[in-house]
Amino acid sequence: MRNRIVSLVALFCCAALLVFSDACLDAARSALAIWWNSVLPALLPFSVFLSLAESAGLPSVLRRLLPVSGSRWAALANALTSFLFGAISGFPNGARIAASAECSPLAAYCNLCSPIFLHSVICCGLLKSPNMFAPLYISHCLSALVLLLASTLTRQVRQAPADTADILRRDGIDLIGGIRDSIGVLGAVGGCMVVFSVLLTILCEANVFRFTAVLFSGIGIEEDVLRAAAHGLLEFSGGCAAIASLSLPLRIKAVLISLTISFGGFCVLLQSRIFLPASAMRVYLLRKALHALLSGLLCYTLFPAFLKTDMPALNIPNGARYIDNSLTGLGLLFASAIPLAAVYLAGLCLKKRLAAHM
């Protein structure tokens, strides 16, 4: 049944490519231009040097520096090392490092957005506000770190069986191999961006969002908002560009962009599938959704500490006011829960440490 549905969807897309050929061609060119001008320059150097550091054994050195003993603490050391590299290098290198460090179930919290891409492309290029980098990146990484620690310390993490064809492991230092693998991975990234951009264009040309907007018109959600949300679910960089063009307060834009980059979209999901086994993808998707929710809530809480002005470009629709009030209450609840969570994690770590020495 599933194969039949996929076949019908594929045939529909092929027919739509013929009917909306001009619009789809423009969308493919636009996505390819974003990949060539922004994504490739931002991610390729990091990816190459990360591959070089990995082949030189730096992750193993970092894991040995952590004073841990026991299988659970060894898993924590692997996860923290993968998190560190993922927070620096960006999608989908975090998934690659997590797979090579044998902590695939935690790849959702290690596969993070590159700080260079977030600052130069999203904050400076799209939002025209470099000051937004701090709340976005802190909420993005801190929420992933909290969930990673909670997942590692509260339950046993088992490595999923690897059925992927190539984890891109190499023996010895190999700069040429790192460049070749990085270009291959980023080529897959560009291909995913083009495919999902064309898919979104097909939905727009077929007036799917126009008909859907009628269902949400009662709560003030317009067609542009639905289009931006769909773009973010499919491909996060284009989704961030669509969110940046909305007439919403800067704080709401920051929350929506935080949700988008933390979830990553199905484009990043397919990129991560290059390194992760199929059995781990359902858990990856659920944990990415949890990461997005926590990141958005944390971004809303931290936003006033970094940006004092929050003036809307146009009048705020009723839907935006409802969202703003709801996020305010959730932000206060989250802020009050942070000390309790910190005390709980500290007590759990102390308990595990004492049990290991007894």
Image (cartoon, helix red, strand yellow):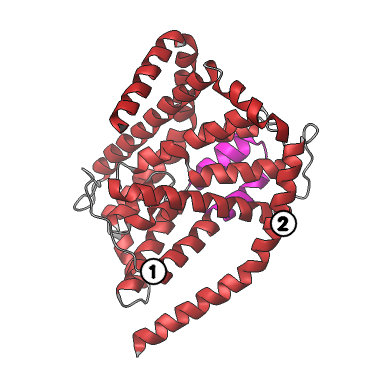
Secondary structure beneath label 2? helix
Say whether residue 246 is left or right of residue 204. Answer: right
The residue that label 1 is drawn on is 155
**Total numbered badges shown on the rendered structure:** 2
Q: Nearer the viewer, residue 208 or 281?
A: 208
Q: Is residue 62 visible?
A: no
The prevailing secondary structure element of the residues shown in magenta is helix
Where does the image place residue 139, in percent across and percent down from the top left?
58, 54
- Give the amino acid type for the residue marked by disc 1 in the picture: Arg
Numbered mark located on residue 329 in the image: 2
Region rendered in magenta: 113-140
Residue projecting furthest to the bottom? 358
Q: Nearer the viewer, residue 105 or 83?
A: 105
Label 2 crowd (10 A; few <14 / some 14-19 / many >=20): few
Disc 2 or 1, which lies upstream in sequence? 1
- Give the amino acid type for the residue marked by disc 2 in the picture: Gly
